[in-house]
Image (spheres, grey):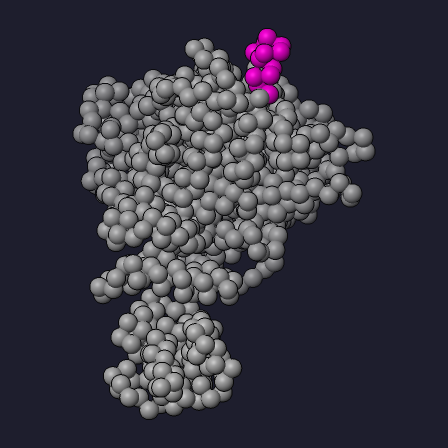
Amino acid sequence: MLNARCRPSLIFSLRRHFNIQARPHVEDERWPGWQVLVGIETHAQIKSRRKLFSGASTDSTKAQANINVSVFDASFPGTLPSLNGTCVDLAIRAALALKSSVQTWSTFDRKHYFYSDLPVGYQITQRYAPFARGGFVQCDENMVNIQQIQLEQDTGKSTFDPRTRTSFIDLNRAGTGLLEIVTHPDMRSPEEAAVYVRNLQALLRAVGASDGNMELGSFRCDVNVSVNRMGDPPGVRCEIKNLNSVKFMTIAITSEVKRQIDHLTTTGTGVSQETRGFSEHSFETYTLRSKEDAPEYRYMPDPNIPPLQISQDHINCVRATLPALPDQVREKLLVHYGLPRRDVDVLMSIDNGKDVMFDGEENKKGAFAYFEELCAPGRSPKVVSNWMIHELLGQLSARKESFLECAIDANRFGELMDLVTNGLVTRTSAKLIIQQLLSETEGRKSPRAFAEELQLLALPSTAEDDGELTALCRDAIQSLPGEVAAVRKGNTNVLNKIVGKVMKESRGRVDAKKARLCLEELLRSANQ
Amino acid sequence: MHRVPRPHNTRFLSSLSSSSSSNAYNALISHAPRTEHGNGPLKGVNVAVKDNICTKDLRTTCSSRMLADFTPPFDATVVSLLREAGARVVGKANCDEFGMGSLNVHSSHGPVVNPFRPSSGSTSPPRSAGGSSGGSAAAVAAGLCDVALGTDTGGSVRLPASYCGVVGFKPSYGLLSRWGVVSFADSLDCVGVLGRSTEGVIGAFDVLNQFDLRDPTAASQELRTQASDLSQSSWDGDIKHLRIGVPQEYFPTELSHSITAPLRKVLTALKKKGATIVPVSLPRTSYALSAYYVISSAEAGSNMVRYDGVQYGHRVPPPPGSDWTKTARVFAHTRTEGFGREVKKRVLLGTYALTADAFDNYFLQAQRIRELIKADFDEVFTAPNVLRPSSSSPSQPTLTNDGQGVHVLLHPSAIRTAPLLPSASSTTSAEGEEEDLSSYVQDVLTVPASLGGLPALSVPAGVAQSGSSGQEGTGDEEDGDGWPVGVSVVGQWGCDRMVLDVGRAVEEVVREL
């Protein structure tokens, strides 16, 4: 048993290289006659409030340096790790989203190396018995298979000032939980790699396992690239490390493929296995270290952390509260709610993946949840989606606010929609009310109370011979003689301007259609 | 009452220790300001704490230059528990650097001198207090405290207890919190208690025996209860029902003859009181020592990586012209100067054991042996091991000659009495190159219980008797030199109370001898 637990999985590294997905070759005009194999190793920061083995906060972006550091994170003698169960649950969510099989028994190991931003001198990872095995990410018509998922610690950050020759070390990030997600070499082009990364991001965000932010470093990809002539066995792979955007990743793979093909065709010797970096200036990869320089990590089972045992019951529990996955949401919006694809795309792009807060807590204000809540009392999904997309999102973006910052909860937004549907508030007034509600800093007034206060309740729609409307229209005709003359000459477009005047004077309380009818009536009668 | 050793003639000690006469044995390396005792079960009890256990008001140097000025920002859980129970921490006890050593000579504070003085009263060269918790044992023996905390990774509490003539207890692994205990080898490290009597040790142990959430290797409350229930149902406390196993492998050729005589007397006395003495075999014992050194060194190597001079502790800035190309080369200056010779040796051994080429043959092999050692123990004890459910089925003990299990094992704690301290000149020259191997052999009797995580108690069993002539200093100081001899009581995991009760019985018969 110990043997199985501790022996490095040679089988897996071989599989990684030779278990090649069978699918028809699609010739790529950039490199005809060649097959490209790409595998990706992703490090995604777990979206938990606290670190993987300590109680310190994970906030490493806003805080000043070395604020969120516990004695354990700073490797003080006498400190011991204690596994954060929330991180484990988020990792289970990730595994479920990737259809990966959570292992009921996994273990933690130490990976040793000396570096100033790794104060304890080793990273706690899962080398011998990973957290989850198998799984896949559907990428268009292809499947990218997952080899394994493991839990591990992030390092601190070090920055070097060449002028003063000083290293600065910030341990805020040190010890934050990471999910390492390793694929099989199932991608055949830079573009397929990009699709995989985007889909993986979307999945992890949807279940709240990670923010998946490449630019901010909460989601980092190392890419393995190999090339071979069609019909030949797979070539020797090179790993490109630390790519911090999908765009750069695509460029790096393209450049690396060209480099390897160039090497093979010009030198006639094989590609040598190495770890490479990517220059964002020259758009080329460069040698970081060769296989011979590969560090000796001296992996050792961590004697402080007992094996992580997860029961099937617990996995089922997590599954029961798993937020909807992007594909499920899309399917539901399209089929169940019958929304047009264009609306679905917009709704799904709103604050993509921020529906789930830290520690996997659900955020009721997420766009999909908001939409469902609005539809629940039987409102038309199409109307709801229109209101959300055209009225709410528009004003939010004008205010430079994200959907999550929206001050109008679904309840009140629904009430406002109903006021309009029932003719109590005009659509124009509704816009004004939304504006007011969004800037409301305290108090949660109902839209109706707002409408009353601002005298925006529509004029009674039943009274045909509404004295007030007629009076407003007469005033407008009187104050705009030039426009009236133009209308009478047959330039009916100018009528809109007079309608606008009425609307303005009524502060939007009148229905524009009714105002138009009334004006036409008045002008007609005056003509005769 | 138990004999409190009189202080040694201290004339020769000035060269070894420059400290005041109150610390003539170099046992305590820092002293706490006098404070009032709190209220609680340990009110009035003075405690010395081994210097690898964190105290927020006293430096915690681990006897290493690396941590010469290090004061932790927190108390270890065991220290907090003692303080809460009314005990007063009087100071920090000298030890081998980071707990690595058997003689307490590998210390930045200098060696600890054994305070014991043979009854003949003659002066003799200073002897070792044993290690690594030598300062803790010496502080108890010299009456500088009532109880001392030590740590025991492979015998570091039991061996000095045996050499200094005090009681030393290493509880089951996982019972006493390791939060705040500076790691040497995490899978083996145990906090231990030393005292002048088993009674005193029990008092402190009862306070310390608490589940601690901050120790991920702490045994759960369920396991504790389960084990103590099984322990109570296997032995009712009546010495007439006690079955004591004597493991034949614990009498190696290195064992001094003067050690076996006191042990024999204890066994005879216990038998006279109705206990059954059973010869048993733990056939894999001979592999224990090498497995222990591979595992403990591998873990030590890993735990020592953090001492790089960046976050805390000693730092040596790279001299001008140094190689800055690799972080490790920058750290090397600090580590070369900060660590002592023994620590460096074990770090190197441990580092090698974990390299990809050696991992299978050394580290994994040692882990397999560790499992076999545990299996050996499980086969002789009547109580099942609650940590190894596979073996907890009503097992038929097979390694005893009558086919029945035993409640505890009894064997010598050490292969000899306290050895002489290396002379001042050899200490400074090479810390005694030739003594190294024999000091490792010294652990042969104590490491199996460490590998098994079992409770083990060393109780004084009198002194090594000289031959019929009664002469002192016959040239062979190992033969009947009148220095203390300890016997060890080892029990099944979680049967700590049983081990302590048997220890009390041993203490009683020794007193009556």
- Residue A449 visible from this viewpoint: no
- Residue plotted at (62% across, 18% down): B434
Residue at 60%, 16% (x, y): give it: A262
From the viewer's side, name the closer residue of B43 and A251: A251
Image height check: is A129 above or below B95? above
Q: Is residue B191 left or right of residue B226?
A: right
Residue B2 percent coordinates (x, y): 44, 43
> A20 or B20: nearer the eye?
A20
Corner quadrant of residue B262: top left
- How far across and down, in percent of the image, does residue A297 sit? 54, 26
Observer-nearest of B6 and A320? A320
* Drawn side of residue A66 relative to residue B150, left or right: right
Q: Which residues are magenta?
A: A259-270
Asked if A274 appears above or below A354 in the picture, the reply is: above
**Residue at the (81%, 30%) spot, across then down:** B321
Q: Where is residue A126 drawn, in percent x and y? A: 43, 32
Assess whether residue A261 is covered by the magenta stretch: yes
Q: Within the magenta stretch, is there residue B469?
A: no
**In the shown orientation, is residue A229 left or right of residue A260?**
left
Q: Main secondary structure of the magenta part?
A: helix
Quarter of the figure that contains the C terminus of chain B: top left
Q: Foreground: A362 or B262?
A: A362
Determine the image quadrant of residue A159. top right
Q: Residue at x 46, y 51 (%)?
A: A50
Q: Residue furthest right?
A: B320
